Amino acid sequence: MTHGVLLSICIPAYNQPDSLCEVLDSIVVDFEDPKIRDRVEIIIHDDASPSGSLASVISPYQKKYENIHFTRHKENIGFDRNLLGVVDEALGKFCWLMSDNDALVEGALQKVISLLDKYPDVGYAYVQARGYDGELKNELGGDLKSMEIVRVASAEEFVQAYDLPGFLSSQIVRKELWDAVEKEKYVGNYWMHLSTILEFLPRTDILYVGTPLVKARGQSTWDKGGKGLMTFLLLRDIVNGLEQYGYSRSFIRDSNDGFARDLFGVMLYAKRRGLVFSIRTAIQLCRKFYQYPIRLIPSLFIFMIPQMVVAYFIKLKS
């Protein structure tokens, strides 16, 4: 079976047994078809979840399907290294990076296998996701960029048309391209997977799959405390370093204009999520956005509003 693996579904997991079962159930439903099952493997790395909480829920799946592989780390190594480890183990020509908190829509795996057969020479595919509530029952709405399937020859064209591809469960990468990137320099930057993809993207053709095939779970806690602002600033830094990988200065300049336009909205949401004012972050904002005073000044004003005032108005609104 391993010699015919087309797609490795790579899941870095930590202490979410119920949601992990949901994503596995959404995958293995297509394993009843041996033409799918024999070309797919699932690899799960548990980043030292307390009390081995994942091993017991994975065991029934492994007993039924020999193409599910599970490893539990003895110590917590962090998300980035857990992701690197799970992809390193993969035998597939392509790797679908998958969160343990999302799920596939019905028929998604079959659709992806068909597309990879149809476009065997692409190096990267972005699969559209649809937002759902915390139970993955109800869609949250929101417009999609496009429902079509498009082959794109340029990394810049792809990003300009469909934005920076940050959502983990939408990423399908050709493993040889992923392996060719020296990834240690990206560990700890909160965007390790995206940094790796952006580095190799100018060297390959890209497939955009506009049909939503992933259910993205809402009510996330990762940005609690307004962490979204920090990841936003780190993302801007990553984009500003892309010239060395073949991106044009005009692309980077246009991207900076986009970050400036988004700053106020990001700040507003971060304050709602508990962001507290700090002089250090304010200085960072001034250094990064001083060329955009119309965007910077109102964002700094929002930043300086005491959290108790923000909490009062949120409570009042609700």
Image (cartoon, rainbow, N blue to C red):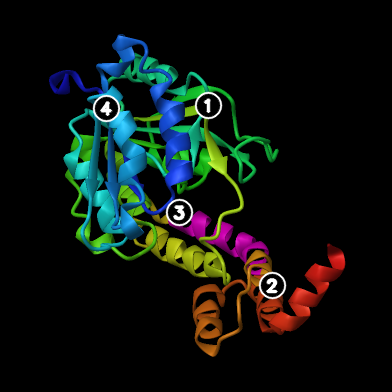
Dot 2 amino acid type: Ile
As drawn, is 270 to the left or to the right of 163?
A: right
x and y percentages locating residue 164 in the rendered image: 47, 48
Vertical comparison of 126 with 253: above or below: above
Local secondary structure at mark 2: helix
Q: Nearer the viewer, mark 3 or mark 1?
A: 1
| Residue that label 3 marks | 250
Please report contact status of discs 3 and 2: CB closer than 8 Å, yes or no: no
Local secondary structure at mark 4: helix
Q: Which residues, given as a range, are shown in magenta?
A: 252-267
Please report contact status of discs 2 and 4: CB closer than 8 Å, yes or no: no
**What is the CA distance from the residue labelled 3 to the residue labelled 1?**
38 Å
x and y percentages locating residue 71 in the rendered image: 22, 45
Name the image quarter holding residue 266. Answer: bottom right
Q: Nearer the viewer, mark 2 or mark 4?
A: 4
Q: Nearer the viewer, mark 3 or mark 4?
A: 4
**What is the CA distance from the residue labelled 3 to the residue labelled 4?**
54 Å
Q: Residues within 10 Å of mark 3 (few under 14, many from 20)?
A: few
Q: Residue at x 18, y 44 (%)?
A: 88
Q: Earlier in the sequence, mark 3 or mark 2?
A: 3
| Residue that label 2 marks | 294
Vertical comparison of 242 with 104: above or below: below
Name the image quarter holding residue 185. Answer: bottom left
